[in-house]
Amino acid sequence: MKRFTPKLSSVAETASCKQRSLDDVVTDFLLRTCLLRPRKSAAAVDAALHCGLARATTLEEDAYTTLATGSVAEFYIEPMLPHISDIDVMCHYNISLEIPRGHPPPTQLPAEFHNCIRVSEIIDSHLPGYVYLRLRYFLIECRDNDNYSAVEDNRGIYAPNISVLPRNDVHGPAMCTDPRDTKLLPVDIVVCVRCLSWPTQAADWQIRHRNYGWPDSATLDRVIRNGCDVVGVAHRQCRQHGWMATHQWRLSFSRAEIVLINSWMPVQQIVYHMLRYFIKTERLTDCVEKFEAGTLSNYHIKTLMLWACELKPKRWWTENVNLVRMCVQLLQTLAKLLTDARCQHYFIND
């Protein structure tokens, strides 16, 4: 009796079928269990409380306006595992405002701003995305019509990036607090300054050609209307330079990211969560202390996903959905980008 020896191709096909079957099970499970989150999740309540606490601890009443960012603002589905471990809160000064260089000062401002505002111009540094803030105007509110009149300041004063909020632990531009005496999640507070206009450094993002219609025109308009922020942190190459270390700021697109990520399909949200969870559980972000320049962070995953949503056709996300395959392909793309050292910023071209 002849012994049966399977061909290698048959073995490979059998293994492939098993893998596809397992992938399908994972995909089906996640698509069924990752549902729209409740209107008031526990993390959202924590975020609201932290926003109130952040305002209450400032040195001047109503000195800041707060905004919840990060995971609590980006995820609109309940992930398959509780994955929101802290709350990110941005606080912007209500007495300061930034404008792109060469732009005229605004004559009307949102209600949260005070009646006397310092307005600085955003000045490019030698590093893309990092800027300086040079005082340019004082705005005074006119009581009769609620408009603001401008007084020029040509002294050339540059704003320092040092925050006045109490600092417990500092991580980049964030002040990390862990309310051990409460049941609240830990919070990272980032003090920032608002720019109500879309920055010129990212002007190309608004007009670049997009083959697949994402983001759509309504989302683009909303992003542009929200402007951006600047946060007080210097580039790692400049942190040993006395003046640059204390005067360099970074453009922040957190408001834009919230709008864009909340426009994603549920499949895209699930893939984003899976990738974040993978790099965390595989301890790929644990090298921050020893190899800061080479750290893989959640921001790499966010950047990867934003580019994928723009560059891949809608059918890639909707036809023959296989979440495992999608994640593998995106991780392979990320590996290639990092190996070639060309992981391009999503908003700033250079």
Image (spheres, rainbow, N blue to C red):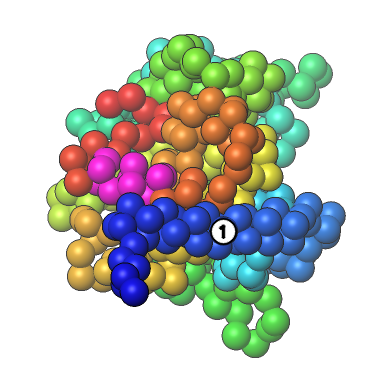
Q: Is residue 340 visible?
A: yes
Q: Quadrant of residue 7?
A: bottom left
Residue 49: image x %, image y %?
73, 65
User: Relative to 73, is 222 above or below?
Assistant: above
Residue projecting furthest to the right: 39
Residue projecting furthest to the front: 1
Was residue 333 drawn as part of the magenta stretch in this picture? yes
Q: Is residue 163 left or right of residue 74?
A: left
Q: Quadrant of the N terminus?
A: bottom left
Q: Which residue: 54% across, 19% down?
A: 212
What are the residue bounds of the magenta stretch? 329-338
Name the residue nearer the viewer: 52 or 198.
198
Residue 254: image x %, image y %?
53, 42
Q: Which residue: 24% across, 36% down?
A: 342
Was residue 48 drawn as part of the magenta stretch in this picture? no
| Mark 1 residue type | Ser
Q: Main secondary structure of the magenta part?
A: helix
Residue 329: image x %, image y %?
40, 45
User: Relative to 115, is 163 above or below?
Assistant: below
User: Relative to 324, is 124 above or below?
Assistant: above
Q: Is residue 76 left or right of residue 202?
A: right
User: In this figure, which residue is indicated by the disc labeled 1?
Assistant: 21
